[in-house]
Amino acid sequence: MHKRPLGRSSLSVAPLAFGGNVFGWSVDERRSFELLDAFVDAGGNLIDTADVYSAWVSGNRGGESETIIGKWLERSGKREQVLIATKVAKWTEQPGLSPVNIQQAVDGSLRRLQCDHIDLYQAHEDDASVPLAETLGAFARLIEAGKVRVIGASNYAADRFADALAVSGQHGLPRYESLQPEYNLVSRSGYEKELEPLIRAERIGVISYYALASGFLSGKYRSAVDLAKSAARGGAVKKFLNPHGLQVLAALDAVASAHQATPAQVALAWLIARPGLTAPIVSATSVEQLHELFGATRLQLTHDEIAQLDLASA
C-alpha cells in the first residue's frame, strides 16, 4: 500500500490512520486487539490516541486507550510495524502545554504504551498561557532524549499554527510536522479557508479527524427516526441532518452506486484524493467495519466524481 510522508519528517503513513478513541470506550480490550491486528494486516500503520482517551466514560479516568495499545504492542510484537501517535494538553489530570506538564505527560504515556519512544507526539490543543518557544523547547528536549521522533498539533487556528512555525524557525526548534483538523464532506470551510493554504505552502502533514462526520457520511442517518436508533451518535449527527447534508448524501449515493461501493468508502476516498492530506483518521468497532473502511484505499474516484462531490458539499 502506498504511504505518504508526514510533512518533511521521516515518517511514512498509510492512507488511513486508526483512531484509538474507541479503545476502553465502545470496544473492550479483546476486541481492541482484534481491530489492531486487522488494521496492521490490512496495511495500516499509524495508530492515533491521546492521554485523555477515554476519560469521558463512566468509571474511567483517562489513559485507558494508551494502556490497551501498550498491552497489544507487548503481546503482538508488532511495535516495529506501526507508528504510535499520542497527544498531550486536554487531560484534566495533566492539562496544558507547560514544559513541566509535557515532561510528566510524555513519561506517563510511554509507561502506558510500554514504548521507549513515541513516533508522533502532538499538542492536543493550543495553550495560549504558555509562550510558544517554551512549549516547542520542551518538545525539543524530548526529541533530543529520544523519547519522541516528530511533533504535531491538533485543533490550532491558522494564525497560531503559523506563529508556531515562525517561532520554530527563529529559535532553531523542531516544528510541528503535522496538524489534526476536523475535515470531511460536510465540514469543509474550517480547514479549507485558512488552514489548507498554510499547510500546503509549508508542507505540513494532515491527519484529519471526524472523517465520516460522527457517522453521518456512512449514510446510516437520514431521518429523525434513524437518529433515535443511536443514543451515542444521534446528538453528534443531528446538526448535519439538513438540506445541505442530505444533498451530500445524495451525491455519495450516486458515486457509490457507480463503483458498487458504500457511501463511507466514497467519503473517505474523497479525503484521500485531496491534495496535501496525509491520512484521514477512522475508527471501527468491528473487524468487518474496518475492512469496509479500508475499501476506500482501493477506490479511485474520477475527476468528474470528485467535482460532483465538491459541488454538492460546497
Image (cartoon, rainbow, N blue to C red):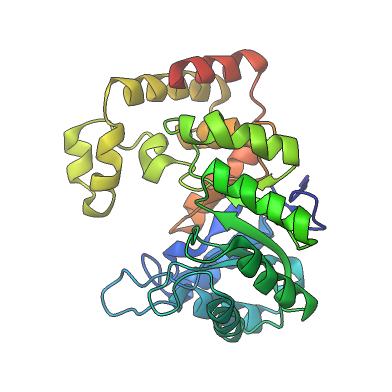
Observer-nearest residue: 231 or 165?
165
**Quarter of the image where one finds residue 83:** bottom right
Q: Is 179 on the left or on the right of 311, as rendered?
A: right
Q: Is residue 49 visible?
A: yes
Observer-nearest residue: 161 or 152?
161
Q: Is 204 on the left or on the right of 312, as rendered?
A: right
> Could you tell me residue 31's position as x and y percent?
46, 70
Q: Is residue 13 above or below residue 146?
A: above
Picture residue at 36% right of the left edge, 38% below the top: 216
Q: Is residue 45 above or below residue 260?
A: below
> Could you tell me residue 277's position as x and y percent?
65, 39
Observer-nearest residue: 193 or 264?
193
Picture residue at 45% right of the left edge, 41% below the top: 212
For the image shown, how many numbered marks are present on the structure?
A: 0
Q: Is residue 14 above or below residue 140?
A: above
Q: Is residue 46 above or below residue 297?
A: below
Q: Is residue 43 visible?
A: no
> Could you tell me residue 263's position as x and y percent?
46, 31
